[in-house]
Amino acid sequence: MLRFASLGSGSKGNATVVAAGDTVVLIDCGFSLRETRRRLALLGLQPEQLTAILVTHEHSDHSAGVSRLARQCNIPVYLTQGTWNSGRLEGCPEVVCFNCEHRFQIGHLEVEAVAVPHDAREPCQFRLHHAGRSVGVLTDLGSVTSHVVERFRGCDALVLEFNHDLEMLHSGSYPAALKRRVAGDWGHLNNQQAAALLQQLGMEKLQHLVVAHISENNNCLQRAASALAAVYGPLDERVVFAAQDRGFDWLRLAAVAGQGQPLQ
């Protein structure tokens, strides 16, 4: 069974857990070691159970806790060469660099790295496969490319960024330069962009949709939900909203019949 959960999602820290059998990977870690341990425990996990840490990019809300966690628990860290060259993840005991667009195996999980437009050295997002199912984690991109649509189409579950509401961002307290950065092609998806992307990806196969990376300053659940409902229809039990303070609890995808063995 493929399952996934979150320790928290937003500008104050991000971390997503994806597991298949005894393979447990953490995507990003923007929390302190103590806070990471506390939040993992809420999911019934200890850091020592982590097989690997995947890093999407070097921004602190995704990477701040990676090195210390990896050192203390001797966990290998997988990231692009550009993210490694940023110098923000030094001290990891074992580093595995991959190229965007590569697929690689970590235990029972096949990991697909997808390049995305974001203002970092060599950012990527991930789609993870096991036993005929896949979950996509797609946040921190400023615009939708045909490549992103192609690579994330057909997911069984999707964690998708609904970062900001344009009206709230423009009328808010952020400096003008930061507003331009957030709303730009290398920033973050607004509610309407995310909803339009979801339409392009198709919703027929989705068993779970997680609305994630919601800005506490420039968005709210009501506006994100309204934008989603415009393309999704009435929201149902498949839709989950990720929170900054607690993420979301385990969601599960049953294996396709006859495909329960690890990928080779």
Image: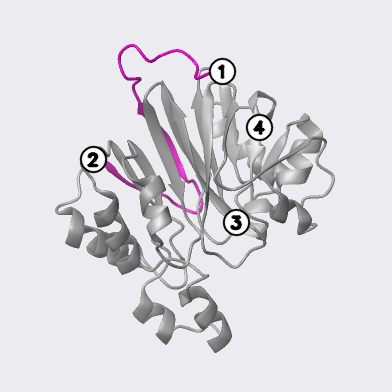
**Which residue position holds label 2?**
237
Q: Give the amino acid type for the residue marked by disc 3 in the picture.
A: Pro
Q: Residues within 10 Å of mark 2 (few under 14, many from 20)?
A: few
Q: Give the amino acid type for the residue marked by disc 2 in the picture.
A: Glu
Horizontally, is 67 left or right of 156 in the view?
right
Q: Which mark is residue 52?
A: 4
Which residue shows up at 65% across the image and 49% down it?
A: 31
Mark 3 / mark 2, whichever is N-terminal: 3
Mark 1 / mark 2, whichever is N-terminal: 1
Q: Give the amino acid type for the residue marked by disc 1 in the picture.
A: Asp
**Which residue position holds label 3?**
123
Q: Residues within 10 Å of mark 1 (few under 14, many from 20)?
A: few
Q: Nearer the viewer, mark 3 or mark 4?
A: 3
Which span is picked out in magenta?
237-264
Q: Residues within 10 Å of mark 4 (few under 14, many from 20)?
A: many
Q: How is the image coloured?
A: one colour
Question: How would you classify the magenta stretch by its main secondary structure?
Answer: loop
Horizontally, is 150 left or right of 94 in the view?
left
Dots 1 and 2: beta carbons under 8 Å? Answer: no
Horizontally, is 110 left or right of 236 in the view?
right
Q: Give the amino acid type for the residue marked by disc 4 in the picture.
A: Ala
Query: Residue placed farthest to the left in the image?
Result: 233
Please say if 193 is above or below 239: below
Please say if 50 is above or below 112: above
Mark 3 / mark 1, whichever is N-terminal: 1
Spatial CA distance of label 2 from label 4 is 31 Å
**Which residue position holds label 1?**
22
Q: Residues within 10 Å of mark 3 (few under 14, many from 20)?
A: many
Q: Nearer the viewer, mark 2 or mark 4?
A: 4
